[in-house]
Image (tube, grey):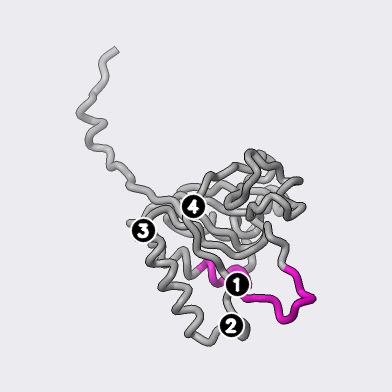
Amino acid sequence: MNYDFAAKEKIPQIEYEIATFAAGSFWRVEAIFRQVRGVLATTVGFMGGMTEYPTYQQVSTGETGHAEVVQIIFDPQVVSYEKLLELFWEVHNPTKPADEGEKIQSQYRSVIFYHNENQHIIAVNSKRDQESSGRFKRDIITEILPATRFYKAKEYHQQYYEKMNSGGKLIR
């Protein structure tokens, strides 16, 4: 069998990037990001904790230190990291509880996990812009942390919202 190796060179290579966000329950957040033009793939899982190979049940106790995250593979030629951050701020409430009686379960906390120094700078500037915008009435408690090991959630958690809602359009 003969292969045309020259033809392979004509196929444009996509230079993709990875973004990882924790913004509450990963099911809804994943469904929203999957609708963005330029997002090539999403995977839900866990990041930022101490337990190796955590299960959903373990993370749900809040004792592993992991947050539920959506890892996004995107084409930066189509959608920028800045645009993904704009959506991140839109899809959840990144503010601190109003009083001490209000608790945020640690697996649902707001975190931007950056994968390189450029993402770190963009995330810090984005958070600063949100803080100065006056949009939120309470302090933003979103953490900005270096990405650590990503643990993929079981397959039944992937695209869960779409599976349960027959793939219908999601209302933000």
Viewer-nearest residue: 39 or 69: 69
**Vertical placement of 44 versus 85: above or below?**
above
Viewer-nearest residue: 50 or 12: 50
Q: What is the count of numbered marks?
A: 4
**Vertical placement of 165 versus 120: above or below?**
above
Report crowding for label 3: few under 14, some 14 to 19, many 20 or more residues within 10 A (C-alpha). Answer: few
Task: Please tell me whether residue 88 belongs to the stretch shown in magenta.
Answer: yes
Q: Are the residues flagged by discs 1 and 2 in contact, CB closer than 8 Å?
A: yes
Q: Earlier in the sequence, mark 2 or mark 4?
A: 2
Question: Which residue was labeled with disc 4?
Answer: 147
Give the distance between the C-alpha atoms of the residues marked 3 and 1, in whole angstroms: 22 Å
Q: Which residues are magenta?
A: 87-103
- What label does residue 136 carry, if any? 2
Give the distance between the C-alpha atoms of the residues marked 1 and 2, in whole angstroms: 9 Å
Q: Earlier in the sequence, mark 4 or mark 1?
A: 1
Residue 144 horizontal/vertical position (percent): 50, 64
Question: Which residue was labeled with disc 3?
Answer: 117
Q: Are the residues flagged by discs 2 and 3 in contact, CB closer than 8 Å?
A: no
Q: What residue is shown at x 53% (from left), y 51% (from top)?
A: 71
Q: Could you tell me which secondary element the residue under label 2 belongs to?
A: loop
Report crowding for label 2: few under 14, some 14 to 19, many 20 or more residues within 10 A (C-alpha). Answer: few
Q: Earlier in the sequence, mark 3 or mark 4?
A: 3
* Most common secondary structure along the magenta stretch: loop
